[in-house]
Amino acid sequence: MLKKLILLAGPTASGKSNLAIKLAKKINGEIINADSMQVFKEFSVLSSRPNSAQTSKIQHHLYGIISVKKHFSAGDWLKQVKKKINICKKKKKIPIIVGGTGLYFNIITKGISKIPDIDIKTRNKVRNSFKKLGYKKFYNQLLKLDPKVKGKILPTDSQRLQRAYEVKLSTKKSLYDWFVKTKPDFSDFEIKKIFIDIPREVLLKNISLRTEEMFKKKCINEVKRFNALKINKTLSANKLIGVKEINDFLSKSISLEQCKELINIKTRQYAKRQNTWARGHMKNWNKLYSKNFSNLLKKSLKVVS
């Protein structure tokens, strides 16, 4: 009999954490984080990490496990997830992987490519070339270097363009040749996949309410403490929505209301990107929603049973 693994995804502020807790109670499960910002110790409020009242009800894993001073890659996350899934198996608990980072879910369902580490010299060369040339010229240059990229990466996707370029330059193989050899680590699991397909108007309301709640919970102090650490600006914790906006407010560039509205706008844009990712990468997932929570729970239980 196959072991069960549950994946629960959805855009930010769609109610994933609450649904995961209720599901875990019903099916004897434990929750594993799949949100790239909720791994950081220093950000509990701004990353909307489950609070102590929630985590006391059900065992939660991989929340607040790493310092913002450290680099934490998708590969690092996979190593941690494997350990936590094994712990759940030994305890006869069903692992429920919950979050909004699409890449993490792709790693579970499709695997992670074993691309060798790119040396810093090549990486800097590519970054400098991108800055010098800009999107269009860099994209055209990449197509000459690696024609397999055509139609697979948008000319505006700066991160993936640079990644494809550095991989080809360093390994002499296309990024997509590496992907072909990729195999998932969880083929011996029965994987149940749920995406919370929340209506846009409900999501926008949730986002605004959550932003207000963050300020009540003193997210400004969280950013002040983060600033005091003086971490490297290239580290991913700097990208957390709210850090730049709150710093702009602290420097008196914008008002508190403007700060909140900018956070709302960025969060809405992020949710839109998450939904776009789901349409492209989660086509065979169970897309569920009900404005009645107990009904949503019933639908979810039907999927995972």
Image (cartoon, rainbow, N blue to C red):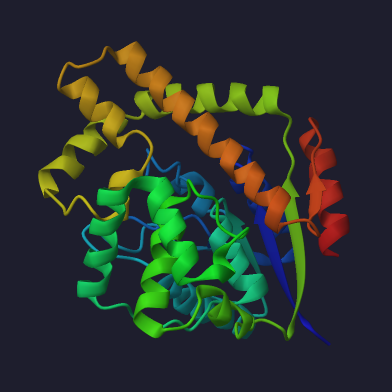
Residue 102 image position (x, y, % from top left): 58, 56
Check the image and report above or below for 117 versus 293.
below
Answer with left or right where residue 298 lies relative to residue 205: right
Q: Residue at x 23, y 57 (%)?
A: 128
Image quarter where the N terminus lies is bottom right
Residue 297 image position (x, y, % from top left): 79, 46
Answer with left or right where residue 262 lies relative to residue 19: left
Camera-side residue of 24 and 99: 99
Q: Is residue 37 visible?
A: no
The quarter holding residue 39 reads: bottom left
Q: Please give the count of numbered marks on the rendered protein.
A: 0
Q: Is residue 273 visible?
A: yes
Q: Residue at x 39, y 84 (%)?
A: 171
Camera-side residue of 156 and 194: 156
Camera-side residue of 279 and 262: 279
Camera-side residue of 216 and 202: 202
Check the image and report above or below for 102 versus 295.
below
Answer with left or right where residue 293 lies relative to residue 133: right
Residue 110 image position (x, y, % from top left): 65, 74
Answer with left or right where residue 176 lies relative to residue 19: left
Q: Residue at x 36, y 24 (%)?
A: 215
Residue 148 image position (x, y, % from top left): 58, 70
Image quarter where the C terminus lies is bottom right
The quarter holding residue 109 reads: bottom right
Q: Residue at x 35, y 14 (%)?
A: 258
Check the image and report above or below for 35 versus 213.
below
